[in-house]
Amino acid sequence: MSQKVVLFDMDGVIADSWQAFYPVFSEYLNKTGFNDLVSEAVLLEMFEGNFYQNLQTALHPCPVNQTNFLQLSLALTTAIKSCSPFPGIKQALQQLNHHYPLYLITNNFNATASVFLEEHRLNVFQEVLGLETHRDKTVKIARIQAQYPDHSVFFISDTLGDILEARQTEAVTIAISWGWHSRQTLLRGSPDTILDTPDELLDYIIHF
Ligand SMILES: O=C(O)COP(=O)(O)O
């Protein structure tokens, strides 16, 4: 078995969290006076590129309000408690964890990710690289790649923006179809593969 390291996105891949993310984010936008951005389609479109860059552009010229941002982090951390892992993903993570180092690379806050992982006893990641680490997943993937120069690096996500950022690295980019973006949207990023179930994901990585 060749050496591999596997990097997971959280929201939409592990956590079934859109139903928590959307109302919390809508409230944040309402509070900041950007009610016109409150739409599932608009928010999902922001994930077609770098979410935070797109958000900043949409909010321009208003800078992101730090107090509201802190409230956002607290609200997301509370909301994630009502979210479950997608069926089969916990078992796939546990299997992969027997063979490879796993990392969580998320646009969510570290605290939100930690609460979700603890709540579901997902003690499988070497490290969580959240929003506080960097707002660009290219940088976070490259950082792990540098730590494992002889390994094949796999990155798994459900959004086009993530796939495009991962394509700027050496990582094998795996899109999964059970998350926030449709298969059609994900294919625009030319991922190395697109998979439909956690079992397929397990199989793909083990036999790569
Ligand atoms: O899929 C996404 O881009 C959002 O997921 P993340 O918050 O875990 O990064």
Image: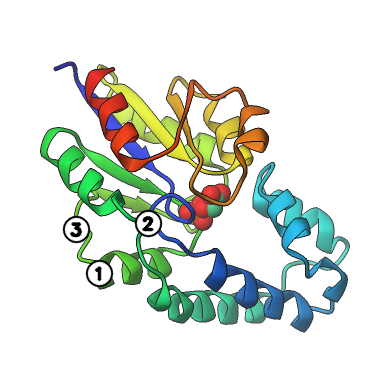
Give the Cα distance between marks 2 and 1.
16 Å
Is ligand 1 less than 8 Å from the beta carbon at label 3? Answer: no
Q: Is mark 1 within 8 Å of ligand 1?
A: no
Q: Secondary structure at mark 1?
A: helix
Please indicate whether residue 34 sits to the left or right of residue 138 in the image: right
Location of mark 3 (residue): 123
Q: CA distance from mark 3 to mark 1?
A: 7 Å
Q: Give the number of the disc on residue 86.
A: 2
Q: Which residue position is annotated with label 1? A: 118
- Give the spatial CA distance, label 2 vs label 3: 16 Å
Task: Work out which quarter of the rendered image holds the N terminus and state it.
Answer: top left
Q: Residues within 10 Å of mark 1 (few under 14, many from 20)?
A: few
**Residue 37 falls left or right of residue 170:** right
Structural crowding at the residue carrying mark 3, measured as other residues with C-alpha within 10 Å and reported as few (<14), some (14–19) or many (≥20):
few
In this view, the residue in front, 140 or 58, is 58
Which mark sits nearer the N-terminus, 3 or 1? Answer: 1
At a point 27% along the width and 72% down the height, the residue shown is 119
